[in-house]
Image (cartoon, rainbow, N blue to C red):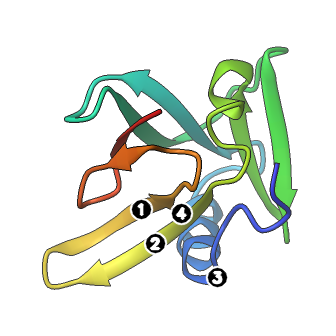
Amino acid sequence: MRQDLLSASAHKHISKLLSAKDESSVFRISIDAGGCNGFQYQFKVDHHVTDDDVVVEQEGVKIAIDSTSQSFLENAQIDYVEDLIGSYFKVNNPDASSSCGCGSSFSI
């Protein structure tokens, strides 16, 4: 897993999200079947970490990733984008063979 899994803007936004929750909260990143390219990224604040999870900490922010999703995210970086469309998390994943314009779904 990359040491810089989160970009500076993603780290800042997730820090804000987690600061409003209790100390056991983590930011969960997972991958599910779906989206326009076969797989889609899911993001949420979670309070439960399982034995199946890999927990990565980057400058005080804890990120939980289930072991299945981890293999898809090995070389990825999560960014937080604010533009005219709105604000959203975008995954820059060099291992994806294609992705949608918003960066929320991909194929391998």
Most foreground residue, 7 or 36: 36
Cα gap from disc 1 to disc 2, whole angstroms: 4 Å
Assess whether mark 3 and mark 2 are in contact (beta carbons under 8 angstroms): no
**Badge 2 element:** strand
70 in relation to 12, above or below: above
Amino acid carrying label 1: it is Phe
**Badge 1 element:** strand
Cα gap from disc 3 to disc 4, whole angstroms: 14 Å
Most foreground residue, 4 or 37: 37
Residue 8, numbered circle? 3
Could you say where residue 54 lies in the image, as x and y percent from the top left? 82, 32
* Residue found at x 43% / y 38%: 42
**Badge 3 element:** helix
Could you say where residue 9 lies in the image, as x and y percent from the top left? 55, 81
Mark closer to the chain start, 1 or 2: 2
Amino acid carrying label 3: it is Ala
Cα gap from disc 1 to disc 3, whole angstroms: 12 Å
Mark closer to the chain start, 4 or 1: 4
Question: Mark 4 sits on what residue?
Answer: 17
Residue 80, numbered circle? 2
Amino acid carrying label 4: it is Leu
Mark closer to the chain start, 3 or 4: 3
* Residue found at x 48% / y 42%: 44
* Residue found at x 46% / y 72%: 80
